[in-house]
Amino acid sequence: MRSLLERALALLGLIAASPFLAGAVILIRLDSPGTAIFRQERVGRYRKPFICYKLRTMAVGTKQAGTHEVSASSVTKIGRFLRATKLDEIPQLWNVVRGEMVFVGPRPCLPSQTELVQEREIRGVYGIVPGITGLGQVRGIDMSEPVRLAEIDAEYLQTRSLALDLRLVWQTVRGGGSGDRVKST
């Protein structure tokens, strides 16, 4: 039941956000060449890969790596705003509609982030669907700390509830957490 509700809310969210998304697509394309919607393979529930959608915040040609492994100079002008406000995550509502993600859960990582994949596997984190936001993100822990993040993901797995999810969504909307950092050099 909760999954169907999340999917319905995500679809309504996409419809409501469509004017913003159209404007963002135009601004992204004016800011830098390339597609406005970024597609990237991520690790999902039971380690099943899926394509995650986001608004593109980095220059075309930026290496496919964890955000913490990419130089801040790769982030476009509009990308800085989108990342700071977390508005780049809106296309992930489509992943929620498709059942590949939920609103709250462990943030999906890249298959190449092998240490995080292994640490999550050890802790049983892949038994739940990844989320647009999560406990680690709200606490400011990103994928540059794979062991610590996997521990926080496991903590979420043990304590998750509707009340916790609503609190994490509220904290995310209010700007809680730093999101994924980029290298400062």
Image (tube, rainbow, N blue to C red):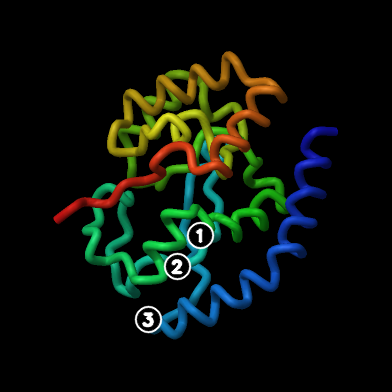
Rendering coords of residue 146 (x, y %): 32, 31
Residue labelled with disc 1: 88
Label 3's element? loop
Amino acid type at circle 3 is Ser
Compared across the picture, whether 58 is left or right of 87 comes to left
**CA gap, disc 1 and disc 2:** 7 Å
Closest to the observer: 87 or 157?
87
Does the residue at mark 3 contact the one at mark 2 (Cβ under 8 Å)? no
- The tag earlier along the polypeptide, 1 or 3, is 3
Rendering coords of residue 178 (x, y %): 39, 42
Q: Residue furthest right?
A: 1
Task: Give the residue displayed 28% in from the left and 63% down from the top.
Answer: 63
Q: Residue furthest front?
A: 174
Label 2's element? loop
Residue labelled with disc 3: 32
93 is higher (above) or lower (below) than 167: below
Decide: few, some or many residues near mark 1? Use Cα within 10 Å; few <14, some 14-19, many ≥20. many
Quadrant where the C terminus lies? bottom left
Label 1's element? helix
Q: Quadrant of residue 132?
A: top right
Quadrant where the N terminus lies? top right
**CA gap, disc 3 and disc 2:** 10 Å
